[in-house]
Amino acid sequence: MSVSSSSTTHRRFVLARRPQGLPVAADFEVVESGVPAARTGDVVVRHTHLGLAPAARIRMSEDVQGYLPPFAIGDTIYGAAVGLVVDSRHDDFTVGDVVVSINGGWQTHDVSDGSNLRPVDLDLAPAPTWLGVMGVSGLTAYVGLTDIGQVSAGDTVVVSAAAGAVGSTAVQFARAMGCRVVGVAGGPDKARHVLEVLGADACVDYKAPDLPRQLAAACPDGVDVYFDNVGGMVRDAVWPLMRQYGRIVVCGQIAEYNRADAVGSGPDWYPLLTRSLVVRGFLASRYQHRYDDFRARAAQWLQDGSVLPTEHVVPGFESTPEAFIGMLQGRNVGKTVVAI
Amino acid sequence: MSVSSSSTTHRRFVLARRPQGLPVAADFEVVESGVPAARTGDVVVRHTHLGLAPAARIRMSEDVQGYLPPFAIGDTIYGAAVGLVVDSRHDDFTVGDVVVSINGGWQTHDVSDGSNLRPVDLDLAPAPTWLGVMGVSGLTAYVGLTDIGQVSAGDTVVVSAAAGAVGSTAVQFARAMGCRVVGVAGGPDKARHVLEVLGADACVDYKAPDLPRQLAAACPDGVDVYFDNVGGMVRDAVWPLMRQYGRIVVCGQIAEYNRADAVGSGPDWYPLLTRSLVVRGFLASRYQHRYDDFRARAAQWLQDGSVLPTEHVVPGFESTPEAFIGMLQGRNVGKTVVAI
């Protein structure tokens, strides 16, 4: 990476209109301006990689109560990014530093006060991995399994969207923690990937007609922890398999994001009482205090080979909306990263 | 209470057949035998009061996975009881001691190894109260608010079945902890009782046609903790009002116990994610380690008048099934206790 390749044009994708259901390219537009210079206390970062996250879809809708505020029309779309410091008037950052930002956004450059930036060690993992296994996706999987799911070695852990960004990381982290891991993924190719590449003990294709039966067969002793990235029919198939004191980690509800109707229904609450279940939603952004512990363990797992990076890199800044839409449709495996 | 009034007949109510929906009297029958003498290590207790609990209904059905095992046909119905020690070959108990048993059962006498017995101090509270506010109902309300609901002073706490055994205690305990308490109860008489006797800040009648609107009006800042004793439509009305980081304590699902169809549906899971909610079921019997703390605080609240006993005493051992059925129908307020 060379600092001199920095363009003088700042391009960013903004929300042009609120998507109805699945977003389309025309919901986004590029806005161009000059790259600003750093003012006192500021850092200018030229992004090299953008990390796409399904949860950004939530904020493209009108107000979702209790969640992060919705984007206004004209706002830059939120997302993590890796980049090079190209200008700095901040004591902690020097031109040439590589950093990861939790909210750099879908843009070529970002001006930051430094509070959202963390140093990146490219000897430990390549840039895209700092958006995937070593990034927000990894932190989400880690906090979901530990703080929320309270997994122990020997637990049966079911992970939905197991080929997705967080799912593929959760599958591998849970295995590294000594759990028996059953993935759920869409289609035979993804199921094979989860089984053979990510090393799950079993993987069920949710598009198969007999999902509940297949899942029950894959979990003969029931389920201790369900890491739910999707909601919907997969959740409904796991629900009756939950063991006493089971924990359900509500990490994503991707089956619900693009729904036209506002209100669906969830499963019967009776097992919550009779099996003393816990169902818990969380936002990884509230668990930054767990970052150091996460980073140390994830780095160790990457180094000893028990966890593989799983980023899917798409070239070209202009392909960002298309890559995002494809991700919501489940076209790829792993974390979707745009290389600028 | 006089030991000499002890009968020589041991009578117990057993499950004659599994209820279909709401139990009827013929689902139970009385079995008589002689009162046994204590063997080494045993205590014979003559029950003076039986505490009735809706959860016993769960165990009258066929196997409910993950829950306490179902009663067999012919089993004595489970329940807490207060009684007098009438025979003892156990070092810790003397004839004349008053004790409370978490599982004395629907019977006139019980033979125990002492492990389920705790001493009762009648100077602190009368016998029925050791089955209500100072008993399992109180422990359930206390653990539900503290360990499960994590209430803090200032929280808005909604309690359903607020005139019921656990509900009427939860309303009072939550107030004693400095919360703003909104009860939900069935009918204007119960709602008035919750408001005027139990001291809730507001109470909504769930039989009113506009429950969701009334509840929203009673909780203008939303709900931090929902103490759910009922499930069903009350839960569905509270759900959209939950605030970010809200906690839902699943203590009972009385609306579901007598359902003919096995599977209903719960609310949409989307708010679990977007508001970082926690929904947690629990069994108070797993929280015996909290008993001493509970007992000390409940006794203090009773003594300083901030909590009132709310037991509803029904005379006559033979009236036990009818009192149980009436409780499931919500006929009374407070804890239903049978005086033998």
Image: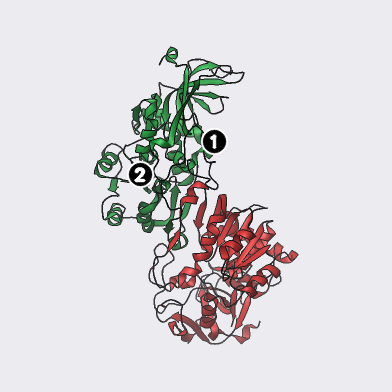
Chain colours: A red, B green
For residue B49, which quarter of the picture?
Answer: top left
Q: Which chain letter matches label 1?
A: B
Q: Which chain letter matches label 2?
A: B
Q: Which residue is mark 1?
A: B289
Percent from the top left, x then y, of residue B192? 25, 41
Indicate the quadrant containing the N terminus of chain A: top left, top right, bottom left or bottom right: bottom right
Q: Which one is nearer the viewer's eye here, A226 or B321?
A: B321
Q: Residue at x 29, y 40 (%)?
A: B194
Q: Which one is nearer the viewer's eye here, B217 or A184?
A: A184
Q: Which one is nearer the viewer's eye here, A228 or A309?
A: A228
Identified by mark 1, the residue type is His
Image: B286 above or below A194: above
Indicate the quadrant containing the C terminus of chain A: top left, top right, bottom left or bottom right: bottom right
Percent from the top left, x then y, of residue B123? 40, 21
Q: Residue furthest right?
A: A304
Percent from the top left, x then y, of residue A297? 67, 60
Asked if one can make out residue B229 in the rendered structure from this viewpoint, the answer is: no
Q: Report the disc number at residue A32.
A: none
Q: Which residue is mark 2?
A: B161
Q: Residue furthest top?
A: B4
Percent from the top left, x then y, of residue B128? 39, 27
Asked if one can make out residue B318 in the rendered structure from this viewpoint, the answer is: yes
Answer yes or no: are tags 1 and 2 on the same subunit: yes
Q: Residue at x 46, y 36 (%)?
A: B139
A297 sits to left or right of B84: right
Q: CA distance from mark 1 to mark 2?
A: 26 Å
Q: Which one is nearer the viewer's eye here, B233 or B140?
A: B233
For residue B307, which quarter of the picture?
Answer: top left
Q: Regarding mark 2 in the picture, which secondary structure is present there?
A: loop
Identified by mark 2, the residue type is Ala
Label 1 environment density (alpha carbons within 10 Å; few <14, some 14–19, many ≥20):
few
Image: B205 above or below A87: above
